[in-house]
């Protein structure tokens, strides 16, 4: 099972739409994907130490994808702000990660927009 992490905390995974869903591996080329008609793209991240999923998420947004974008895998709470900054709407984590890093740890990082170092440099 998995837990969905959003800016408001943990939530159960909603039922998957029957159509308009694409699952990408961390090694897939997002430019090869036909974005038309997709409502949800799930980018699978195999390990918290593998950042290629972040690059795929950013590239999908740069390619014009405006639908829902989830990072899926054993990410840690410290990665949540970066996942949001590159364009992911939510993170799907395994139950084991949710038990080890409870909702309070993820919510601490839910103010990801307030802690953008680039914004602080511009101030």
Image: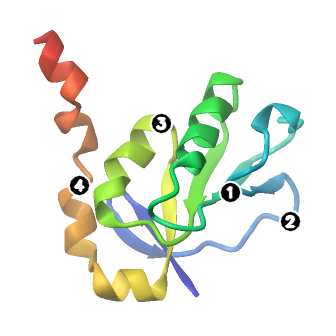
Q: In this view, which residue lies farthest toward the front?
A: 49
Q: Is residue 49 above or below residue 86?
A: below
* Residue of label 1: 42
Q: How far is disc 2 from disc 1 in space, using C-alphas? A: 14 Å
Please tell me which of labels 3 and 4 falls first in the chain: 3
Q: Residue furthest top?
A: 122
* Foreground tag (3 vs 2): 3
Query: Who comes first in sequence, dot 1 or dot 3?
Result: 1
First reached walking from the N terminus: tag 2 or tag 4: 2
Label 4 residue SS: loop
- Work out whether residue 4 or residue 93 is closer to the camera in this orientation and state it: 93
Task: Count neighbours of disc 3 (C-alpha within 10 A) and say few if under 14, some if 14 to 19, many if 20 or more.
Answer: some
Question: What residue sits right under mark 4 in the picture?
Answer: 109
Helix, strand or loop for disc 1: strand
Q: Using the image, determine if residue 94 lies above or below residue 79.
A: below
The kind of secondary structure element at disc 2 is loop
First in sequence, mark 3 or 2: give its number.
2
The residue to which callout 3 is attached is 86
Q: Mark 2, residues whose alpha carbon is within 10 Å: few (<14), some, or many (≥20)?
A: few
- Quarter placement of the C terminus: top left
Residue 122, label in figure: none
Where does the image place residue 77, in percent across and percent down from the top left? 31, 64
Image location of residue 85, percent across then percent down: 40, 37
* Residue 103: % across, % down: 27, 75
Where the N terminus falls, by quadrant? bottom right
Which disc is residue 18 wearing?
2
């Amino acid at each position: 099972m998995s837990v969905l992490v959003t800016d408001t905390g943990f939530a159960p995974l909603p039922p998957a739409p029957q159509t308009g869903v694409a699952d990408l591996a961390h090694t897939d080329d997002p430019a090869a994907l036909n974005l038309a008609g997709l409502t949800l793209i799930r980018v699978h991240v195999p390990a918290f130490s593998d950042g290629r999923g972040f690059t795929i998420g950013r590239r999908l947004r740069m390619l014009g994808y405006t639908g829902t974008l989830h990072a899926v895998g054993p990410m840690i709470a410290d990665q949540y702000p970066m996942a949001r900054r590159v364009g992911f709407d939510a993170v799907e984590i395994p139950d084991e990660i949710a038990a080890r890093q409870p909702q309070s740890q993820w919510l601490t990082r839910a103010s990801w927009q307030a802690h953008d170092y680039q914004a602080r440099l511009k101030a």
